Image (cartoon, grey):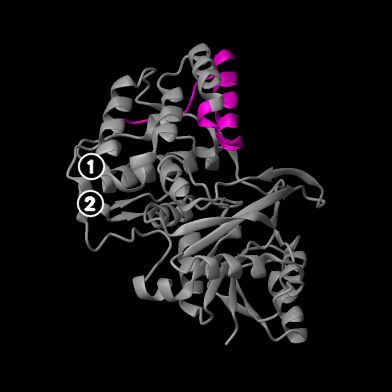
Amino acid sequence: MPLFDVLMPVKNGEAYLELAVRSIQQQTVKDWRLLVLDHGSTDRTCDIVQQMARLDPRIQMHSFPAVPGLAGLLNEGLALVEAPYAMRMDADDESLPERMALTEAEFRFSPDLVLVGGQAVVIDAAGRRIDRLDTPTDPKVLGRVSLFRNPFVHPTVCFKSAAVAERHIRYGRSLYARSDAAADIHVPALAEDYLLFAELAAEGRTANASSDLLRYRHHAGGVSRQKFRDQLVVSAEISRHLAGLISRRAGLPPFDPVPFCSHGTTLLRVDGADSYAHHYDAMCVVLAKSGGMWEHARDELRWRGVFIDRSPIGLLSRAAKRWVSCRPDRHERHTVKNAALQLFRGRQLISVPAMSMPPQASTRQLDLPSPAGKQA
């Protein structure tokens, strides 16, 4: 049995597929199996994989052309896992040589972890470094931040397979659907990773390695503007789902976290409003009373107060006052910058409807088209 099973979903990925596979072959850990999950490719993807598999029996091709969405494809892959660790990988990225070794070390250091991600270097189509994706590392910080955004780079993550099997962990479905009727949310695409990772983070069972694990490719085949908008809407609904879990467990009234979210380094409007002081007060009361990792969340909540309205001057003023004490990371700083620029230029922020109070207990399927590019 290998130590790592690597899940690589792909559809028409001939451009960078060989580079991605080579990066797995170049790992310092040699005990792995690569499961390429083809989603009905019509280019040379299958030929490339089959040719490489003939030379390296650790590479396997599995075709699932009819499964719905990326969530369905990844769930088929999870069902194939036999190794102690199930690692994600995209067909246009490149894993750094020490990725498996560093990931295993994180799991060994903290045996209670179920998921480990890490940092990533952003590269362009030619492989040149253009940016980086920095993520929080502390499990408690990840649990708190996950209410407001996805603090994981999807293709860096790795699961502990025993936990996947024991809890029947799958993409696109809430871990709590069986025990909480109001948690029966279905996310087949666009943000299926955020739903899963955030629920695990809320349990304090996730971490990000402080080291770079991946070269994350940004190229012309990425997510379109409309798909980006759709991702933001789905992510907002997941944040509301997470807030509902917190409220119901604590026996407290529901609250709406969306005005204070920073999905995609973007601020949203709720029902076209500009001021969210009441929403902020309600959120702080519930989180303060919910206990757990929210008992020491003063800085996180003070930072979320920066987003209490959509005045660009007020936004910048509050951010400046809380810059030193709250120490916002790069993602949050970019959120402030992007929102202020949009507002100063008179551009409309994306608006989502107000949240139903209380949330409906029936199944909510967020059935939007699968993105053409990455799932970050």
Query: What residue is at 60 percent from the left and 42 percent from the top?
Result: 224
Q: The N terminus appears in which quarter of the rendering?
A: bottom right
Rendered location of residue 347, percent (x, y):
54, 19
Q: Which residue is depicted at the point 45% across and 55% down?
A: 197
Q: Amino acid at mark 1?
A: Pro
Magenta part of the chain: 325-354
Q: Amino acid at mark 2?
A: Ala
The stretch drawn in magenta includes residue 118: no
**Label 1's element?**
loop
* 10 Å crowding of disc 1: few (<14), some (14-19), many (20+): some
Dot 1 and dot 2 residues touching (CB under 8 Å): yes
Could you tell me which residue is drawn at 28 percent across and 59 percent down?
Answer: 176
Neighbor class of circle 2 (other Cα within 10 Å; few <14, some 14-19, many 20+) is: many
Q: Position of residue 286 (x, y in %)?
A: 26, 36
Q: Quadrant of residue 316?
A: top right
Q: Residue at x 71, y 75 (%)?
A: 49
Q: Quadrant of residue 154?
A: bottom right
Q: Which residue, given by chain and number where applicable, does mark 2 sit on?
A: 182
Q: Where is residue 160 shown, x and y percent of the image?
A: 48, 71
Tag on residue 359?
1
Give the x, y percent position of residue 243. Answer: 31, 42
Quick check: can you spot residue 8? no
Rendered position, 307 above or below 88: above
